[in-house]
Amino acid sequence: MTPRTSPAVGGMGHSVKRKEDPRFIRGQGTYVDDIELPGMLYLDIVRSPYAHATIKHIDTSKALAMPGVLDVITGATLAKYNLHWMPTLMSDMQMVLPVEKVMYQAQEVAAVLATDRYTAADGVTAVEVAYEPLPVVVDPFKALEPGAPVLRTDKPGKTDNRIFHWEVGDKAATDRAFRDAEVTVQEDMYIPRIHVSSIETCGCVAQFDRVSGQLTIWMTTQAPHAIRTVFALVAGHVGLAEHKIRIISPDIGGGFGGKVPVYPGYVIAVAAAVLTGKPVKWIEDRMENLQADSFARDYHITAELAAQRDGTLTALRIKTLADHGYTDAAANPSKFPAGLFHICTGSYDFRAAHVEVDGVYTNKPPGGIAYRCSFRVTEAVHTIERMVDIMAHELQMDPAEFRKKNFIQPNRFPYTSALGWEYDSGNYGAALDLAMHKIGYAELRREQAEKRQRGEIMGIGISSFTEIVGAGPSKHFDILGIKMFDSCEIRIHPTGKVIARFGTKSQGQGHETTYAQILAEELGIPVADIQVEEGDTDTAPYGLGTYASRSTPTAGAAAAIASRKIRDKARKIAAHLLEASEEDLEWEPGKFFVKGSPERSKTIQEITFAAYTNYPQGMEAGMEAVSYYDPPNLTFPFGSYICVVDIDKGTGEVKIRRFVAVDDCGNIINPMIVEGQIHGGLTMGLAPALFEEISYDAQGNIQQGSFMDYLLPTAMETPNWETDKTCTPSPHHPLGAKGIGESATVGAPAAIVNAVVDALWHLGVRHIDIPITPQKVWQCLRARGVTD
C-alpha cells in the first residue's frame, strides 16, 4: 500500500481555536479550565484521521517554526523515558503516544506545546504525519475469524484478537434445564456504543516543582487516589514516587464513569510539566471528547430463556461478544472482566443459569466504561427484561402477571442467585403493584385493546430490574490489586465544629449534603457546623472514588462507623464529666444524659471541648476518628418502571405518553437528592433507548463525531417523569441504605423498548435494537403493510 501524507487532525473536523471563540471566555470558577498559573503552557493533541495505519514519518518543522510553539512531543519522545505505554485499569496496556502505528480514528499521535492555547491549536494543524493505512477491523465477529489481522502485535505471542473468555454458572445444569423446558425463546440483541457526554470535557493542569520534586495535578477525575497510584506505577521509574504526587479534583461538570480512566492527555501534560518545569494545561474540546474518550456498552448478546407452559421460568443462557476497542480500558473489578453482567438473572427465581462473555479487540477507541451503571449492569438488565417480555408474549401472558409469578419472593432473602450473587433484601411485587396502581395499568390495557381495533398503535412496557451497587466488598472487588473499600475521616474541633474528609469524589451527586446529614444524624451536630471535603489526595483518606453508585453504600457507611467511634469516646468523656458510669448514660442526638436524670447531661459540643481540656487521665486528647469501610456485601436496589408509548404510523415517531418509575433504594438520606438522581438517570436512560449511538463505517470512520449527529435529548424530548418509592432497607448496611444514582439509567431503556415492541407485537415485531429511531419503526411498519 502506498504511503500517504495527510495533515494531522484533532479528531475529525478539528478547528483552530481563535481568540474570539466564546468557548474560551471564562469567569472565575473552580473547574480545571479556570485554573491559571504563572508561566503556564498549553497542550493540544494531534490526532489520527485513520483507524489503523503505520506511522511513516512525523514532520514537525512547520509547527516548530511558529512563534509561541515550544515543542512537539511524539511517541519517540516519550519512549526515551519508557512513558509511551501505560497500564489500563483492567491491567491491559494502552498507548500514550504511538511509536509505530495508530489503532483508531482520533487516536493521539503527537502533542503541541505552546505559550497559549490558540497557538497550540494552530500548531496542531501545522504538524504533518505520513501514514500507510492498514486493514481495519471494526466488527468484533470478523475480528475473531481465522485469518483476521492481529491488532495487538505489541503483545508477544498474540495470535488472535480475543482479550478474554469468561463464564459463570452451571453449564451442565442449564443445558439440562433447556432440554427439559416446555417453551424456549431466543433473541439476538445489540446494545451499541454510547458516550457519557458530560457537560465538562476531560482536562488537567500539571505543575512540577523541580526543587521539592512535588508533582501537583488538578484534573477531572472521579477517583483521585486510584489515579495517583496509576501515575506512580507509570512514572515511578523516572522518580515520580506516590508520596510526591498530589491529585486535586476540584468541581467536576459531570463524570458518569467517563472520568475514571487515565487518558493519554493527562500523561502527556505531566511529562511536559516535568520536562519543562512549567505548569501545563490540557483541555480537550467537545469533538475530541466525543470521538476519542472511553466508551460504554458495545455488547452483542444472544440470550435464551427456558420456561414451563404454566409460565414458570427455569433457566437462562447467554453468550455475549464484548467489543472493547483496541485495548481493554474498562474500570471493572479485576475478578470480573465482564463486570457485574452476571446480575442478568435479575429479579427472577431461576433454577439454573450460565453466561459466557468474550472480549474482543477492534479498531475503535477503548471501550467498557461503566456509563452511569455499576459495571455492565445496564446491559444485564436490558437483556433479562427484554427476554422476560418476549417469553410473556410468547406464552400469551400479561407481562406484569408473568413477572409477579417469577419474582424472588420477600421471604427468600437473603437470596443466592443461580450465578452466585447474594441479594440482601427485596420486595419486587410491592414495587410493581405500586407502579401498576399509579399508572392505572388495567385501564391502559383496555385502552390498548380498543385502539388496536381502530388501527392505532399503543404500547405498555415494564422493567422490573435489580441493580447491584456499592463496590467492594474487598473479597470480590479490587482495581489493579487495590481493594475496593472506602473511607471517612472526621475531626471535631474544640469548639464543636466538624471537618469530614472522604475518599470519594462528587461530580454533582450532592455528597456535601448527604454526608453532612449522615454526620449530623449520628453526632447530633448541626449541618451548618459540618464541612465536607473530597478530592485532594494530600488531605483526604485513601479511597477508590465515586462511580457505580458506591458513595453512600461505602463512604456513607464509613461516615456512620467513624461517627460511632467518636460517640464511643464521647461516652467515656461524658461519664468522666458527669461522674457516672458509662453504662448509666443514654444517648440522644446531640447529648449524653444520666438514665432517670435527664437534667444531668453534656452536649456533644461540651464533650468535644473537654476532649481538649478535661479528658480522663490516660486517654488520648482530641476528638477524631477514621473508618475504612469494607462492606460485607453489595447492596441490591431495585425498581419497577412502566412506560406508555403511542406510535405515529406516518413517521414512526415514538411518543412517550407516561412513564412511572418506582424505586427502592432502602432508607433514604435526602429525598430531594434521591429525586434529582432519579430524574437525571431517567433522561439518561431515555437517551440510548431512542437517540444515542456511536457507530463506525468499514474503514473505522466515526459516524457520530459531533453533537450534530450524536443526538442528546433536551427538555423538549424529555417526558414528565412520575416517581414513587418503596422502602426495603439493606440489612447489612449501617444506615440501611442501598444507593440510587444509577438505577434509573439501568432500568429505563428496557421499559421503553418493551413498550415499543408491545405496541408492535401483534404485527409480528419481536425485537428492535436500541436506539429505536423513527426510521427503524417506520421500516417495521412498512414491511408489514401498515400505512397512515
Image (cartoon, rainbow, N blue to C red):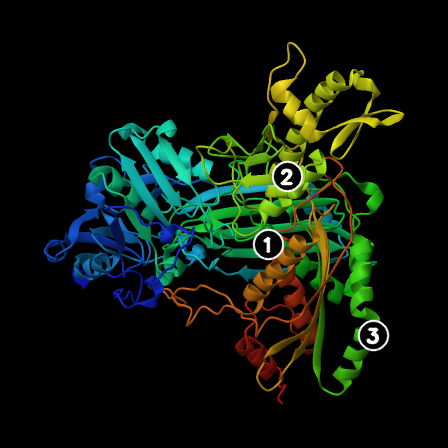
Residue type indicated by callout 2 = Gly
Q: Which is in the foreground here, disc 3 or disc 2?
A: 2
Give the spatial CA distance, label 3 vs label 1: 30 Å
Is 349 placed above or below 761 here?
above
- Identity, as a three-letter code, of the amino acid under mark 1: Thr
* In this picture, residue 776 sits left or right of residue 450: left
State the image coordinates of residue 308 (x, y, percent, origin top left): 79, 55
Please tell me which of labels 3 and 1 falls first in the chain: 1
Going from N to C along the chain, the mark reached first, 1 or 2, is 1
N-terminal-most mark, 3 or 2: 3
* Residue at the extreme bottom: 788
Rendered residue at 57%/42% (across/down): 167
Q: Is 197 left, or right, of 757 in this rendering?
A: left
Front residue (pair 578, 734): 578
User: Can you name the residue that lies furthest to the top here?
Assistant: 618
Give the residue type that dot 3 points to.
Glu
With respect to residue 383, does 76 lie above or below?
above
Q: Report if residue 176 is visible in the image.
A: yes
Question: Disc 1 marks which residue?
Answer: 378
